[in-house]
Amino acid sequence: MAISLYDASAALFIQTLGAVDGFLGRSLKHFQEHNIDPEVVVETRLFSDMLPFRYQIQAAIGHSLGALQGVKSGVFNPPHGNPATDYAGLQKEVADAIAALKAMTPADVNALEGKDVAFNLGERSLPFIGENFLLTFSLPNFHFHATTAYDILRQKGVPLGKRNYLGAIKMKT
């Protein structure tokens, strides 16, 4: 069985962003039960030289939905974050990204194979082919940022486990 670009990118983005949505909800419940202001978490960093929680969520969105949109347009710019600066806003951004990803059909995503995309970083422009960009650049970045967001919540005492990160896995039916 061949694996399509959709299966290797969009389907994985939906699975993991679904998990992010789940652990954001579980974390909010934990914060409410323990009288912790979730807004404090928004600016939390694992280390002083790392970007805050809000950026980790926004970068996960940028390297999933944003990456697919970038390949479609032919240009990807690094995620600079969206206007949401509060916990509820981040939850909404994740839900909106999941909805947008689910609206993409396998044919839409598979049509991106072989498409040129430039990753623009300041004055530099790095050329890619769509599938190489998604699989070797955006997918690793996506998981890095989703994992870092998960780790920040764990650091804040939220009882999350690996299954919370994995999301809805596809088992044989």
Image (cartoon, rainbow, N blue to C red):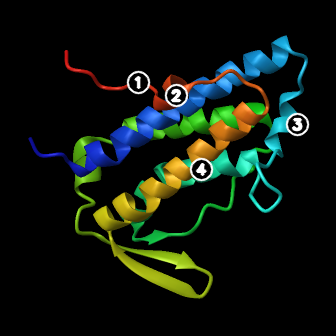
Badge 1 vs badge 4, beta-carbon distance below 8 Å: no
Q: Of the residues shown, which amino acid type is indicated by label 1?
A: Ala
Question: Alpha carbon of mark 2 to alpha carbon of mark 3: how far?
Answer: 24 Å
- Identify the residue under disc 1: 168
> Which quarter of the figure has residue 73?
bottom left
Q: Residue at x 70, y 52 (%)?
A: 55
Q: Work out whether residue 145 or residue 80 is closer to the camera in this orientation and state it.
A: 145
Number of residues whose C-alpha sits closer than 10 Å to that of mark 2, classed few (under 14), some (14–19) or many (20 or more): few
**Which image quarter holds the N terminus?**
top left
Query: Whole-percent x and y of residue 138?
Result: 45, 59
Q: Work out whether residue 158 or residue 118 is closer to the camera in this orientation and state it.
A: 158
Give the mark, 3 or 4, whose residue is nearer the N terminus: 3
Residue at the bottom extreme of this rendering: 123
Q: Of the residues shown, which amino acid type is indicated by label 4?
A: His
Q: Of the residues shown, which amino acid type is indicated by label 3?
A: Val
Q: Residue at x 35, y 48 (%)?
A: 9
Q: Residue at x 39, y 71 (%)?
A: 74
- Identify the residue under disc 4: 145
Q: Work out whether residue 119 or residue 157 is closer to the camera in this orientation and state it.
A: 157
Q: Of the residues shown, which amino acid type is indicated by label 2?
A: Lys
